[in-house]
Structure formats: structure tokens, C-alpha cells
């Protein structure tokens, strides 16, 4: 794999992991604002970084 492609893949995975962890820190008001439930946030937040959102 080309170095720049490997770096891009790494950055995407790191961003996905950060975003999922941040979902776990949102309060109920913010979750309502983005249109997801606490259960949805927990399911998404606990996914492995390599799993895509469906």
C-alpha cells in the first residue's frame, strides 16, 4: 500500500474512533439535538473503529 494511502486510512480510523468516543460523552439534550437516543449513541460509541456505520 502506498504511504499516503496508508496515512489517509490511519487518519480516517482515528477520526472515527474519536467521534465514537465523543458520542458517549454527550448529554441527553445534545443527543436529542442530533436526533439519536442514548441507546443508539452507546451502540455506536462502543463499535470498533474499523466497523462502518450502517
Image: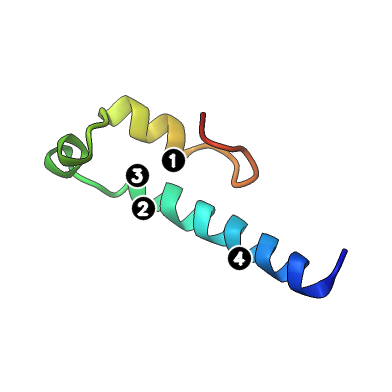
Q: Residue at x 49, y 38 (%)?
A: 46
For the residue pair 3 and 43, the one nearer the viewer reads as 3
**CB-based contact (under 8 Å), mark 1 and mark 2:** no
**CB-based contact (under 8 Å), mark 3 and mark 2:** yes
Label 2 or label 4, whichever comes before in sequence order = 4
Badge 4 is on which residue?
11
Q: Quadrant of residue 37?
A: top left
Badge 3 is on which residue?
24
Q: Position of residue 43 (x, y in %)?
A: 44, 30
Q: CA distance from mark 4 to mark 1?
A: 18 Å
Badge 2 is on which residue?
22
**CB-based contact (under 8 Å), mark 1 and mark 3:** yes
Q: Position of residue 18 (x, y in %)?
A: 46, 57
Label 1 or label 3, whichever comes before in sequence order = 3
Q: Residue at x 29, y 49 (%)?
A: 25
Q: CA distance from mark 3 to mark 4?
A: 21 Å
**CB-based contact (under 8 Å), mark 4 and mark 1:** no
Q: CA distance from mark 3 to mark 2?
A: 5 Å
Q: Which mark is residue 54?
A: none
Find numbered disc 4 in the image and state the secondary structure of the residue it sits on. helix
Q: CA distance from mark 1 to mark 2?
A: 8 Å
Q: CA distance from mark 1 to mark 3?
A: 6 Å
For residue 2, above or below residue 48:
below
Q: Which mark is residue 45?
A: 1
Density class for disc 4 (Cα within 10 Å; few <14, some 14-19, many ≥20) is: few
Find numbered disc 1 in the image and state the secondary structure of the residue it sits on. helix
For residue 43, above or below residue 15:
above
Label 4 or label 1, whichever comes before in sequence order = 4
Q: Residue at x 24, y 47 (%)?
A: 26
Amino acid at each position: 500500500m502506498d504511504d499516503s494511502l496508508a496515512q489517509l486510512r490511519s487518519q480516517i480510523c482515528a477520526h472515527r474512533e474519536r467521534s465514537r468516543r465523543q458520542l458517549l460523552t454527550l448529554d441527553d439534550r445534545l443527543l436529542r439535538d442530533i436526533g439519536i437516543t442514548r441507546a443508539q449513541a452507546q451502540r455506536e460509541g462502543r463499535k470498533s473503529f474499523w466497523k462502518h456505520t450502517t
